[in-house]
Image: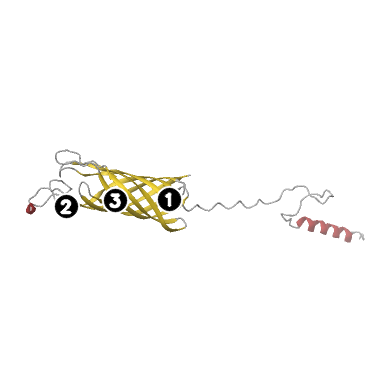
């Protein structure tokens, strides 16, 4: 047997070990030019992508468009017993129109426009569009659908992450279009309104909310109501 085989085996083992050794990402791959620098080389394995930015957590400088479904319950006390509010008096009370009424508020949609003035303050304008008809001028007459315009301010009181509690202060103009028995328009009414609720923002561009509200009207008749609603809001940018 030749005496050169140990040398050959040693060289072969060294070449195999060098080929199997892992290459670090920061090690230069390629020949040195002799000046201490190395040519640019392809690094195996891509770098991790940059982490996505955190949600902004507020609506500052965003325009919003919301849509909610609303209903509730109300008490109405008329100033004039000849004015119909949805119920008839009993025979023992002489018949005719009831002096006061308890009834469910007809279902309606609220379309809400908003602008985030600061992280805690949002300007808003609600437009209420009735789905069901309300009571008419008599127990047999067809009534109007609700139509309110409610400018105001929404305050974000406290929250954690994308969950925020809010409260509103609004002055609602009720232009529903009620009429008396003779067919005369009863004009507009003014309502003081406050809504308190919870908003959950799943993304900077959209979220959902639920709320309970109280309101008082006093021009056509004295009306006190409570209502609840749920909706979705889209925002830009």
Q: Nearer the viewer, mark 3 or mark 2?
A: 3
Residue 194 falls left or right of residue 223: right
- The image position of residue 218, as x and y in percent, is 23, 49
- The image position of residue 187, as x and y in percent, is 22, 41
Residue occupying image coordinates x 35% and y 52%: 168
Residue topped by disc 3: 192
- The image position of residue 190, as x and y in percent, is 26, 46
Residue topped by disc 1: 207
Residue 110 falls left or right of residue 77: right
Of pointers 3 and 2, the one earlier in the residue sequence: 2
Q: Which mark is residue 100?
A: 2
- Looking at this view, is 48 or 6 the one in front? 48
Residue occupying image coordinates x 43% and y 58%: 159
Q: Nearer the viewer, mark 2 or mark 1?
A: 2
Q: Nearer the viewer, mark 3 or mark 1?
A: 3
Of pointers 2 and 1, the one earlier in the residue sequence: 2
Q: Residue furthest top?
A: 183
């Amino acid at each position: 047997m030749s005496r050169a085989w140990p040398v050959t085996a040693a060289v072969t083992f060294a070449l195999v070990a060098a080929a199997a050794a892992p290459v670090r990402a920061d090690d230069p791959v390629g020949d040195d030019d002799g000046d201490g620098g190395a040519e640019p080389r392809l690094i195996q394995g891509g770098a991790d992508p940059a982490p996505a930015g955190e949600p902004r957590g507020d609506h500052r400088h965003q325009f919003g468009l919301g849509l909610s479904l609303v209903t509730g319950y109300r008490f109405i006390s008329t100033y004039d017993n000849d004015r119909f509010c949805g119920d008839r008096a009993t025979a023992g009370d002489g018949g005719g129109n009831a002096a006061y009424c308890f009834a469910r508020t007809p279902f309606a949609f609220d379309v809400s426009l908003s602008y985030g003035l600061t992280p805690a303050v949002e300007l808003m304008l609600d437009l209420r569009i009735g789905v069901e008809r309300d009571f008419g001028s008599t127990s047999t007459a067809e009534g109007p659908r609700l139509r309110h315009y409610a400018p105001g301010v929404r305050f974000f009181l406290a929250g954690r992450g994308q969950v925020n509690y809010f409260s509103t202060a609004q002055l609602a103009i009720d232009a529903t279009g009620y009429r008396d028995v003779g067919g005369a328009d009863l004009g507009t009414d003014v309502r003081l309104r406050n809504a308190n609720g919870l908003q959950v923002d799943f993304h900077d561009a959209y979220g959902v909310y639920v709320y309970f509200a109280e309101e008082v009207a006093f021009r056509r008749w004295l009306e006190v109501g409570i209502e609840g609603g749920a909706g979705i809001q889209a925002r830009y940018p």
